[in-house]
């Protein structure tokens, strides 16, 4: 890792860019996927259409999507918005099915009890269904986050920043240390984000910890 310390400023800049390119789409994707997943869970026909459309979107190669974004959005080829929008699309495609499955897994008797207590559909969703769906949603979010972190590196092929630049510049210069540093840093970033999401999920579901503790006892 000597190369990293010798080029620390440029590495930190690339890391900061990578974090922005990766985490903003994950957050936006979650914001869009939750209401879409809720709608899909309430209507079987819409669920089939939306999940199939999401699966189709995810099959589009990321590099092609980066290139297609400028004419669709009216932006320049190297505008960061292209990467953020493209990766948000991928995140939504991954999470719509996850959110729908998570909500459908909420026990029926819990939903019936909320209805009997006079909960409106929106209040029931926010106060009952969504909290109980958190563990499954977080599991899907972890997959989406790690996937997005890896996909950001593809953008370096057409000139976007991020840790992918360490790959492309390292190949161009035949610098194995630079390439290896990029690989290690991407893996470490993915590990840190995944661990943070896992911890966040546990903090949001204290009843899960209590259940685990009783089972262990």
Image (tube, helix red, strand yellow):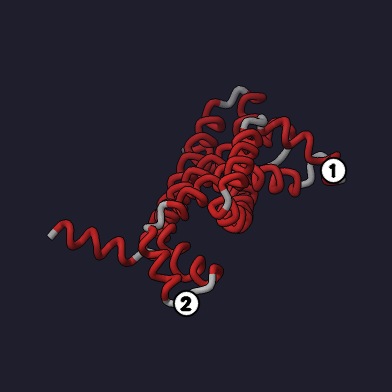
Q: Secondary structure at mark 1?
A: loop
What residue sits right under mark 1 in the picture? 76
Q: Is residue 205 above or below residue 24?
A: below
Q: Position of residue 182 (x, y in %)?
A: 54, 36
Q: Residue furthest top?
A: 174
Residue at point 83%, 42% (across, down): 72
Q: Residue at x 51, y 36 (%)?
A: 181
Quarter of the image where one finds residue 62: top right
Q: In the drawing, what numbered circle is on residue 197?
A: none
- Does residue 112 lie above or below 24 as drawn? below
Closest to the observer: 166 or 204? 204
- Which residue bears the numbered disc 2? 118
Closer to us: 121 or 33 = 121
Toward the bottom, the furthest residue is: 118
- Mark 2 closeness class: few <14, some 14–19, many ≥20 residues within 10 Å: few
In this rendering, the label closer to the viewer, 2 or 1: 2
In screen coordinates, is 158 left or right of 141?
right
Question: In this rendering, is residue 168 above or below 196?
Answer: above
**Count of numbered badges drawn on the protein:** 2
Q: Position of residue 30 (x, y in %)?
A: 57, 55
Image point (47%, 62%), residue name: 130
- Residue 204 in percent (x, y) is at 40, 65
- Quadrant where the C terminus sits is bottom left
Residue 171 is situated, as x and y percent measured from the top left of the image, at 62, 24
Q: Horizontal placement of 119 versus 18: left or right?
A: left
């Amino acid at each position: 890792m000597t190369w990293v310390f010798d080029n620390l400023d440029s590495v930190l800049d690339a890391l900061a860019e990578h974090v922005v390119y990766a985490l903003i789409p994950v957050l936006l994707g979650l914001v869009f996927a939750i209401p879409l997943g809720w709608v899909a869970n309430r209507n079987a026909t819409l669920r089939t259409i939306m999940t199939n459309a999401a699966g189709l979107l995810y099959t589009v190669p990321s590099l092609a999507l980066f290139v297609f974004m400028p004419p669709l959005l009216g932006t320049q080829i190297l505008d960061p918005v292209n990467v953020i929008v493209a990766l948000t699309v991928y995140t939504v495609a991954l999470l719509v099915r996850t959110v729908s499955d998570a909500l459908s897994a909420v026990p029926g008797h819990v939903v019936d009890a909320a209805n009997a207590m006079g909960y409106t559909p929106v209040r029931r969703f926010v106060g009952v269904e969504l909290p109980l769906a958190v563990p499954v949603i977080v599991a899907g979010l972890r997959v989406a986050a790690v996937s997005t972190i890896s996909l950001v590196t593809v953008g370096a092929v057409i000139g976007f920043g991020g840790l992918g630049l360490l790959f492309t510049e390292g190949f161009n210069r035949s610098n194995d240390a630079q390439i290896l540093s990029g690989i290690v840093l991407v893996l470490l970033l993915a590990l840190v984000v995944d661990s943070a999401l896992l911890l966040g999920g546990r903090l949001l579901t204290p009843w899960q910890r209590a259940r685990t503790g009783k089972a262990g006892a």
